[in-house]
Amino acid sequence: MLINLSSVLNRTTHSALQSANPDPAEPLHTLDLQLLHYWTTATSASIANTASPHPFWSIDCPQIAFSNEHTLHLILAFSALHKMQAGQHDPEALQSRATHHFNLGLRQTHTALSQLSTSNARAIYISAILICFCTFALGPSPGDYLLFSLHNSGGNTWFSLIRGVRVILEAMGTQFIHDAQGPLKTLVKSPANDSPVEHKRSYIVCWQEPVERLRKHIMACSEHEQIYLKALDGMTPSLEAVWGKTTDLRETLQPNREHMVFAWLYLLEDDFVRRLGQKDQVALLILGYYALLLEELKCFWFMHGWPEHLLAGVQQCVDEEHMRWVEWPIQKFAIT
Protein backbone atom coordinates (compact mmCIF):
# COMPACT_ATOMS: atom_id res chain seq x y z
CA MET A 1 0.00 0.00 0.00
CA LEU A 2 1.43 3.31 -1.07
CA ILE A 3 1.25 6.23 1.33
CA ASN A 4 0.81 9.71 -0.05
CA LEU A 5 3.57 11.35 1.97
CA SER A 6 2.70 14.83 0.71
CA SER A 7 -0.88 14.42 1.92
CA VAL A 8 0.24 13.23 5.35
CA LEU A 9 2.63 16.15 5.72
CA ASN A 10 -0.04 18.63 4.70
CA ARG A 11 -2.54 17.21 7.21
CA THR A 12 0.10 17.16 10.00
CA THR A 13 1.21 20.71 9.27
CA HIS A 14 -2.38 21.96 9.14
CA SER A 15 -3.17 20.24 12.46
CA ALA A 16 -0.04 21.67 14.12
CA LEU A 17 -0.83 25.19 12.97
CA GLN A 18 -4.38 24.91 14.25
CA SER A 19 -3.27 23.64 17.68
CA ALA A 20 -0.59 26.32 17.96
CA ASN A 21 -3.23 29.03 17.45
CA PRO A 22 -0.64 31.78 16.84
CA ASP A 23 -1.44 35.18 18.30
CA PRO A 24 -1.21 37.85 15.58
CA ALA A 25 -0.42 40.39 18.33
CA GLU A 26 2.90 38.63 19.03
CA PRO A 27 5.03 39.10 15.88
CA LEU A 28 8.54 37.72 15.55
CA HIS A 29 10.86 40.53 16.56
CA THR A 30 13.79 40.10 14.22
CA LEU A 31 15.46 43.00 16.03
CA ASP A 32 15.59 40.86 19.17
CA LEU A 33 17.43 38.17 17.22
CA GLN A 34 19.84 40.82 15.98
CA LEU A 35 20.34 42.01 19.56
CA LEU A 36 21.14 38.50 20.77
CA HIS A 37 23.64 38.11 17.94
CA TYR A 38 25.14 41.50 18.79
CA TRP A 39 25.42 40.41 22.42
CA THR A 40 27.46 37.33 21.57
CA THR A 41 29.71 39.07 19.04
CA ALA A 42 30.21 42.57 20.49
CA THR A 43 28.47 43.47 23.77
CA SER A 44 29.91 40.52 25.70
CA ALA A 45 33.43 41.65 24.76
CA SER A 46 32.68 45.21 25.87
CA ILE A 47 31.69 43.97 29.34
CA ALA A 48 34.79 41.83 29.72
CA ASN A 49 36.96 44.60 28.23
CA THR A 50 38.54 42.14 25.81
CA ALA A 51 39.24 42.25 22.10
CA SER A 52 36.99 39.25 21.44
CA PRO A 53 33.85 37.82 23.09
CA HIS A 54 34.41 36.41 26.57
CA PRO A 55 33.28 32.79 27.13
CA PHE A 56 31.30 33.58 30.27
CA TRP A 57 29.40 36.54 28.87
CA SER A 58 29.01 35.31 25.29
CA ILE A 59 28.24 31.61 25.97
CA ASP A 60 27.49 30.85 29.62
CA CYS A 61 25.35 33.92 30.26
CA PRO A 62 22.94 33.36 27.32
CA GLN A 63 22.65 29.68 28.26
CA ILE A 64 21.62 30.70 31.78
CA ALA A 65 19.24 33.28 30.31
CA PHE A 66 17.40 30.70 28.19
CA SER A 67 16.14 29.16 31.43
CA ASN A 68 15.63 32.48 33.21
CA GLU A 69 13.55 34.96 31.22
CA HIS A 70 14.46 37.97 33.37
CA THR A 71 18.12 37.52 32.48
CA LEU A 72 17.29 37.19 28.79
CA HIS A 73 15.30 40.43 28.81
CA LEU A 74 18.20 42.27 30.44
CA ILE A 75 20.71 40.83 27.97
CA LEU A 76 18.59 42.18 25.11
CA ALA A 77 18.11 45.54 26.85
CA PHE A 78 21.83 46.05 27.44
CA SER A 79 22.68 44.88 23.92
CA ALA A 80 20.19 47.41 22.49
CA LEU A 81 21.78 50.21 24.51
CA HIS A 82 25.25 49.15 23.34
CA LYS A 83 24.15 48.97 19.71
CA MET A 84 22.56 52.41 20.04
CA GLN A 85 25.74 53.84 21.59
CA ALA A 86 27.72 52.45 18.67
CA GLY A 87 25.45 54.35 16.26
CA GLN A 88 24.04 51.25 14.62
CA HIS A 89 20.46 50.63 13.45
CA ASP A 90 17.48 52.91 14.10
CA PRO A 91 18.07 54.64 17.48
CA GLU A 92 14.33 55.03 18.18
CA ALA A 93 13.69 51.33 17.58
CA LEU A 94 16.65 50.38 19.76
CA GLN A 95 15.51 52.72 22.53
CA SER A 96 12.02 51.22 22.38
CA ARG A 97 13.30 47.63 22.64
CA ALA A 98 15.76 48.57 25.39
CA THR A 99 12.98 50.15 27.46
CA HIS A 100 10.64 47.21 26.82
CA HIS A 101 13.16 44.56 27.84
CA PHE A 102 14.57 46.54 30.76
CA ASN A 103 11.16 47.09 32.34
CA LEU A 104 10.22 43.43 31.93
CA GLY A 105 13.59 42.25 33.21
CA LEU A 106 13.45 44.55 36.22
CA ARG A 107 9.96 43.42 37.19
CA GLN A 108 10.69 39.73 36.66
CA THR A 109 13.96 39.92 38.61
CA HIS A 110 12.12 41.31 41.64
CA THR A 111 9.59 38.48 41.33
CA ALA A 112 12.33 35.85 41.02
CA LEU A 113 14.07 37.28 44.07
CA SER A 114 11.07 36.34 46.22
CA GLN A 115 11.62 32.73 45.08
CA LEU A 116 15.38 32.67 45.65
CA SER A 117 17.00 29.24 45.75
CA THR A 118 20.34 27.63 44.95
CA SER A 119 19.01 26.82 41.48
CA ASN A 120 18.23 30.41 40.44
CA ALA A 121 20.60 32.49 42.61
CA ARG A 122 23.25 32.73 39.90
CA ALA A 123 20.76 33.93 37.29
CA ILE A 124 19.26 36.51 39.67
CA TYR A 125 22.75 37.73 40.53
CA ILE A 126 23.58 38.14 36.83
CA SER A 127 20.31 40.00 36.30
CA ALA A 128 21.06 42.34 39.21
CA ILE A 129 24.42 43.20 37.66
CA LEU A 130 22.84 43.73 34.24
CA ILE A 131 20.26 46.05 35.82
CA CYS A 132 23.21 48.01 37.21
CA PHE A 133 24.93 48.11 33.80
CA CYS A 134 21.72 49.12 32.01
CA THR A 135 21.19 51.94 34.49
CA PHE A 136 24.69 53.22 33.82
CA ALA A 137 24.26 52.76 30.05
CA LEU A 138 21.09 54.87 30.05
CA GLY A 139 23.33 57.73 31.14
CA PRO A 140 23.07 60.33 33.92
CA SER A 141 19.78 62.14 34.45
CA PRO A 142 19.58 65.66 35.91
CA GLY A 143 18.88 65.51 39.62
CA ASP A 144 19.23 61.70 39.82
CA TYR A 145 22.46 60.39 41.33
CA LEU A 146 21.79 56.64 41.63
CA LEU A 147 21.77 56.48 45.43
CA PHE A 148 20.11 59.81 46.08
CA SER A 149 17.95 62.27 44.20
CA LEU A 150 17.19 65.96 44.30
CA HIS A 151 13.55 65.14 43.65
CA ASN A 152 12.86 63.20 46.83
CA SER A 153 14.40 62.30 50.18
CA GLY A 154 13.37 58.68 50.41
CA GLY A 155 14.42 55.44 48.80
CA ASN A 156 15.23 54.78 45.17
CA THR A 157 15.42 51.94 42.66
CA TRP A 158 18.94 51.13 43.73
CA PHE A 159 17.90 50.65 47.33
CA SER A 160 15.71 47.66 46.48
CA LEU A 161 18.32 46.37 44.02
CA ILE A 162 21.11 46.46 46.60
CA ARG A 163 18.88 44.83 49.19
CA GLY A 164 18.12 42.09 46.67
CA VAL A 165 21.80 41.40 46.04
CA ARG A 166 22.42 41.34 49.79
CA VAL A 167 19.73 38.69 50.16
CA ILE A 168 21.58 36.60 47.56
CA LEU A 169 24.91 37.09 49.34
CA GLU A 170 23.43 36.20 52.71
CA ALA A 171 21.91 33.05 51.24
CA MET A 172 24.88 31.97 49.12
CA GLY A 173 27.81 33.45 51.09
CA THR A 174 29.86 36.58 50.45
CA GLN A 175 32.41 34.61 48.42
CA PHE A 176 29.67 34.39 45.77
CA ILE A 177 30.44 37.96 44.70
CA HIS A 178 34.11 37.13 44.08
CA ASP A 179 33.51 33.78 42.35
CA ALA A 180 36.28 33.28 39.79
CA GLN A 181 33.65 32.33 37.20
CA GLY A 182 31.10 34.90 38.34
CA PRO A 183 29.83 38.01 36.56
CA LEU A 184 31.90 40.59 38.44
CA LYS A 185 35.15 38.64 38.47
CA THR A 186 34.88 38.05 34.72
CA LEU A 187 34.53 41.75 33.93
CA VAL A 188 38.16 41.72 32.86
CA LYS A 189 39.10 38.08 33.34
CA SER A 190 40.56 37.04 30.02
CA PRO A 191 40.22 33.65 28.35
CA ALA A 192 43.41 31.73 27.62
CA ASN A 193 43.74 33.05 24.08
CA ASP A 194 42.92 36.68 24.80
CA SER A 195 44.17 39.53 26.94
CA PRO A 196 42.29 42.30 28.72
CA VAL A 197 43.23 45.88 28.04
CA GLU A 198 46.07 46.61 30.45
CA HIS A 199 46.00 49.53 32.86
CA LYS A 200 49.64 50.23 33.60
CA ARG A 201 50.39 52.21 36.73
CA SER A 202 51.74 55.37 35.16
CA TYR A 203 50.67 57.75 37.94
CA ILE A 204 50.26 57.87 41.70
CA VAL A 205 47.07 58.67 43.60
CA CYS A 206 47.88 59.50 47.21
CA TRP A 207 44.53 58.42 48.61
CA GLN A 208 45.57 57.19 52.07
CA GLU A 209 45.96 60.58 53.76
CA PRO A 210 42.66 62.20 52.66
CA VAL A 211 40.74 59.01 53.42
CA GLU A 212 42.32 58.80 56.87
CA ARG A 213 41.45 62.47 57.53
CA LEU A 214 37.84 61.76 56.65
CA ARG A 215 37.89 58.71 58.87
CA LYS A 216 39.10 60.72 61.86
CA HIS A 217 36.48 63.39 61.18
CA ILE A 218 33.76 60.72 61.23
CA MET A 219 35.06 59.24 64.48
CA ALA A 220 35.22 62.64 66.13
CA CYS A 221 31.98 64.20 64.99
CA SER A 222 29.49 61.60 63.85
CA GLU A 223 26.72 60.22 66.02
CA HIS A 224 26.38 57.10 63.83
CA GLU A 225 30.05 56.52 63.16
CA GLN A 226 29.83 52.73 62.80
CA ILE A 227 27.45 53.02 59.84
CA TYR A 228 29.78 55.44 58.06
CA LEU A 229 33.03 53.70 58.97
CA LYS A 230 31.76 50.38 57.67
CA ALA A 231 31.04 52.00 54.30
CA LEU A 232 34.36 53.88 54.22
CA ASP A 233 36.44 50.92 55.39
CA GLY A 234 34.58 48.71 52.93
CA MET A 235 35.97 50.92 50.18
CA THR A 236 39.59 50.22 51.20
CA PRO A 237 39.94 46.94 49.21
CA SER A 238 38.75 48.81 46.10
CA LEU A 239 41.15 51.71 46.73
CA GLU A 240 44.08 49.34 47.22
CA ALA A 241 43.16 47.28 44.17
CA VAL A 242 42.86 50.30 41.86
CA TRP A 243 45.51 52.68 43.24
CA GLY A 244 47.79 50.38 45.21
CA LYS A 245 48.86 50.23 48.83
CA THR A 246 52.00 52.33 48.37
CA THR A 247 53.28 55.30 46.39
CA ASP A 248 55.77 53.10 44.53
CA LEU A 249 55.16 53.06 40.79
CA ARG A 250 56.77 49.62 40.69
CA GLU A 251 54.06 48.11 42.86
CA THR A 252 52.11 45.43 41.01
CA LEU A 253 48.39 46.12 41.01
CA GLN A 254 45.80 43.37 41.15
CA PRO A 255 44.70 42.11 37.74
CA ASN A 256 40.97 42.18 37.01
CA ARG A 257 40.54 44.73 39.78
CA GLU A 258 37.62 46.60 38.24
CA HIS A 259 35.16 44.15 39.78
CA MET A 260 36.18 45.44 43.21
CA VAL A 261 34.81 48.90 42.39
CA PHE A 262 31.39 47.55 41.46
CA ALA A 263 31.41 45.18 44.43
CA TRP A 264 31.40 48.11 46.91
CA LEU A 265 27.95 49.16 45.70
CA TYR A 266 26.45 45.74 46.33
CA LEU A 267 28.00 45.38 49.79
CA LEU A 268 26.57 48.61 51.22
CA GLU A 269 24.48 48.30 54.37
CA ASP A 270 20.80 49.26 54.23
CA ASP A 271 21.25 51.99 56.84
CA PHE A 272 23.97 53.68 54.79
CA VAL A 273 21.97 53.50 51.54
CA ARG A 274 18.95 54.89 53.37
CA ARG A 275 21.01 57.81 54.67
CA LEU A 276 22.25 58.54 51.17
CA GLY A 277 18.64 58.65 50.01
CA GLN A 278 18.02 61.23 52.74
CA LYS A 279 21.06 63.22 51.56
CA ASP A 280 22.85 62.75 54.87
CA GLN A 281 26.00 64.92 54.81
CA VAL A 282 28.57 62.36 55.97
CA ALA A 283 27.16 59.65 53.68
CA LEU A 284 27.44 62.07 50.75
CA LEU A 285 31.10 62.74 51.56
CA ILE A 286 31.88 59.02 51.34
CA LEU A 287 30.03 58.75 48.02
CA GLY A 288 32.09 61.69 46.75
CA TYR A 289 35.27 59.70 47.37
CA TYR A 290 33.75 56.69 45.64
CA ALA A 291 33.08 58.82 42.54
CA LEU A 292 36.85 58.99 42.05
CA LEU A 293 37.00 55.20 41.85
CA LEU A 294 34.34 55.22 39.16
CA GLU A 295 36.63 57.43 37.09
CA GLU A 296 38.95 54.42 36.85
CA LEU A 297 36.19 52.50 35.04
CA LYS A 298 36.21 54.81 32.03
CA CYS A 299 37.42 51.86 29.94
CA PHE A 300 33.78 50.71 29.97
CA TRP A 301 31.53 52.56 27.51
CA PHE A 302 28.55 52.48 29.85
CA MET A 303 30.38 54.39 32.61
CA HIS A 304 30.97 57.55 30.58
CA GLY A 305 29.86 60.70 32.38
CA TRP A 306 28.91 59.04 35.67
CA PRO A 307 31.89 59.92 37.91
CA GLU A 308 31.57 63.65 37.19
CA HIS A 309 27.80 63.48 37.53
CA LEU A 310 27.92 61.80 40.95
CA LEU A 311 30.51 64.19 42.33
CA ALA A 312 28.61 67.21 40.99
CA GLY A 313 25.52 65.92 42.80
CA VAL A 314 27.45 65.53 46.04
CA GLN A 315 28.91 69.01 45.64
CA GLN A 316 25.43 70.42 45.10
CA CYS A 317 23.96 68.81 48.23
CA VAL A 318 26.81 69.19 50.73
CA ASP A 319 26.49 72.23 52.99
CA GLU A 320 29.20 74.81 53.59
CA GLU A 321 30.34 73.16 56.83
CA HIS A 322 31.13 69.86 55.08
CA MET A 323 32.35 71.25 51.75
CA ARG A 324 36.01 71.20 52.77
CA TRP A 325 35.83 67.42 53.12
CA VAL A 326 35.14 66.99 49.41
CA GLU A 327 37.91 69.32 48.30
CA TRP A 328 40.20 66.40 47.55
CA PRO A 329 37.91 64.56 45.08
CA ILE A 330 36.81 67.88 43.58
CA GLN A 331 40.44 68.87 42.98
CA LYS A 332 41.17 65.49 41.43
CA PHE A 333 38.31 66.04 38.99
CA ALA A 334 39.13 69.75 38.59
CA ILE A 335 35.45 70.59 39.09
CA THR A 336 34.82 74.23 39.88
Image (cartoon, rainbow, N blue to C red):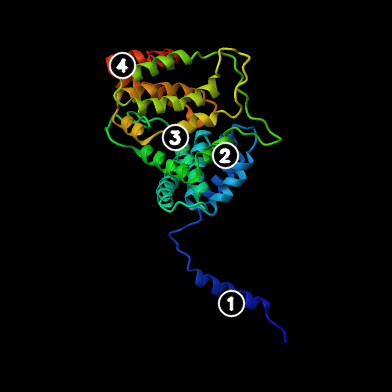
Circle 4 residue: 322
Observer able to see residue 305: no
Instruction: Find the distance from the CA under tag 1 to the CA under tag 3.
Output: 59 Å
Q: Residues within 10 Å of mark 4 (few under 14, many from 20)?
A: some
The numbered mark, 1 or 4, whose residue comes first in the sequence reads: 1
The picture places residue 276, in percent across and down from the top left corner, at 33, 30
The numbered mark, 4 or 2, whose residue comes first in the sequence reads: 2
Question: For the residue labelled by badge 1, is the local secondary structure a helix, a strand or a loop?
Answer: helix
Instruction: Find the distance from the CA under tag 4 to the CA under tag 3.
Output: 25 Å
Q: Amino acid at mark 3?
A: Leu
The dot on residue 267 is: 3
* Nearest-to-viewer mark from 1 and 2: 2
In what quadrant of the picture does the N terminus appear?
Answer: bottom right
Marks 2/3 in contact by CB < 8 Å: the verdict is no
Question: For the residue labelled by badge 4, is the local secondary structure a helix, a strand or a loop?
Answer: helix
Q: Amino acid at mark 2?
A: Asp
Question: For the residue labelled by badge 3, is the local secondary structure a helix, a strand or a loop?
Answer: loop
Observer able to see residue 267: yes
* Nearest-to-viewer mark from 4 and 3: 3
Circle 1 residue: 11
Q: Residues within 10 Å of mark 2 (few under 14, many from 20)?
A: few
Circle 2 residue: 179
Q: Amino acid at mark 1?
A: Arg
Q: Looking at this rendering, what residue extends furthest in the bottom direction?
A: 1
The numbered mark, 1 or 2, whose residue comes first in the sequence reads: 1
Instruction: Find the distance from the CA under tag 2 to the CA under tag 3.
Output: 15 Å
Marks 1/4 in contact by CB < 8 Å: the verdict is no
Q: Residues within 10 Å of mark 3 (few under 14, many from 20)?
A: some
